[in-house]
Image (spheres, rainbow, N blue to C red):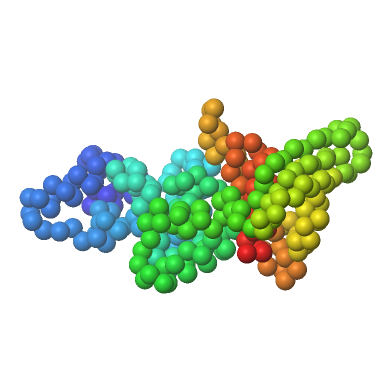
């Protein structure tokens, strides 16, 4: 009754901010188990397995954090779990029924990778494949391991040995105002490349033409800072589309923003040509 009042904005004058301790003491004293789906207090009450539920919760939490409204209003969560001593982290759990929104939520909330919206479907399929094979729920660290191995700084076939970019004339109206000189290793052979473009990514891309790699179209690019201070690193996300209209992403992480972008580009290329 107290919790029902609380959800309607009425203060029940009861201390409910440590509900897990209340459950623990109840179970110890009565030797009875609180059902995992018991309203407000059950272990799985603030957990979503359904992909549509996960996506709705993620969008609701994002809006709540961004707009900071006076009242709590997130789909499928009648109360803010933090108000009663629970946490956000267990809300999204991943099994074979989970959707791409829940997977993106785990990767962002646990590891601070803010995946582009267009990338959600791709990572969702990778994780879904694993959950279908093993038939069990995945822990966040297992999800991140799949994500890391598939995307971050992938350089099996094409890798970067050296990179330098120069602005030819920052006041020039010429689109090809950036020159890149780099050394890459492609299938075990080191090659020095040079390219011009309207930015480092474009110039590097143009320089790769000497390797006669299949042509790709850049369709998505995003970046953000992973952390702050002296240990700050940049993370870049690049999506490339091949001639068959298939889009694959690469992620680069480096203390240099420009290098992070080039690593992301190389990763996306490797995922296409592997």
Left or right: where does residue 13 sit relative to residue 152?
A: left
Residue 99 can be seen in this image: no
Instruction: Tell me what residue is drawn at x 60 percent, y 36 percent.
Output: 255
**The C terminus is located in which quarter?**
bottom right
Residue 180 can be seen in this image: yes
Q: Along the line of sight, which residue is nearer the eye, 42 or 11? A: 42
Q: Along the line of sight, which residue is nearer the eye, 239 or 262? A: 262
The relative height of residue 197 versus residue 99 in the rendered view (above or below) is above
Left or right: where does residue 199 sit relative to residue 222?
A: right
Looking at the image, which residue sits at the far right? 173
Image coordinates of residue 60 in percent, x first then y, are 49, 52
Instruction: Tell me what residue is drawn at x 65 percent, y 51 percent.
Output: 159
Instruction: Tell me what residue is drawn at x 53 percent, y 35 percent.
Output: 227
Looking at the image, which residue sits at the far front? 189
| Number of on-image labels | 0
Q: Along the line of sight, which residue is nearer the eye, 165 or 30? A: 165
Image coordinates of residue 162 in percent, x first then y, are 70, 41
Image coordinates of residue 91 in percent, x first then y, are 38, 54
Image coordinates of residue 32 in percent, x first then y, are 11, 58
Instruction: Tell me what residue is drawn at x 77 percent, y 53 percent.
Output: 208
The relative height of residue 261 versus residue 267 in the rendered view (above or below) is above
Left or right: where does residue 64 sit relative to residue 258?
A: left
Tell me where residue 250 sits by quadrant. bottom right
Q: Along the line of sight, which residue is nearer the eye, 190 or 20? A: 190
């Amino acid at each position: 009754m107290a919790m029902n009042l609380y959800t309607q904005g009425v203060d029940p004058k009861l201390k409910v901010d440590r509900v897990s301790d209340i459950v623990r003491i109840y179970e110890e004293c009565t030797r009875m188990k609180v059902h995992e789906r018991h309203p407000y207090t059950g272990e799985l009450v603030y957990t979503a397995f359904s992909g549509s539920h996960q996506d709705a919760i993620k969008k609701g939490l994002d809006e709540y954090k961004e707009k900071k409204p006076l009242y709590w209003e997130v789909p499928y969560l009648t109360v803010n779990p933090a108000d009663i001593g629970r946490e956000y982290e267990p809300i999204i759990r991943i099994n074979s029924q989970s959707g791409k929104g829940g997977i993106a939520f785990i990767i962002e909330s646990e590891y601070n990778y803010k995946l582009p919206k267009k990338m959600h479907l791709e990572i969702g399929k990778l994780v879904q494949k694993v959950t279908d094979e093993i038939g069990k729920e995945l822990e966040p660290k297992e999800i991140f391991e799949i994500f890391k191995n598939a995307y971050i700084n992938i350089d099996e076939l094409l890798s970067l040995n050296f990179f330098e970019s120069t602005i030819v004339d920052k006041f020039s109206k010429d689109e090809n105002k950036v020159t890149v000189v780099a050394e890459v290793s492609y299938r075990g052979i080191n090659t020095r490349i040079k390219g011009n473009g309207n930015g480092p990514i474009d110039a590097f891309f143009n320089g790769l033409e000497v390797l006669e790699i299949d042509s790709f179209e850049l369709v998505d690019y995003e970046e953000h800072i992973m952390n702050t201070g002296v240990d700050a690193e940049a993370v870049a996300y690049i999506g490339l589309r091949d001639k068959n209209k298939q889009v694959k992403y690469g992620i680069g992480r480096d203390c240099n923003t420009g290098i992070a972008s080039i690593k992301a580009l190389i990763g996306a290329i490797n995922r296409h040509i592997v």
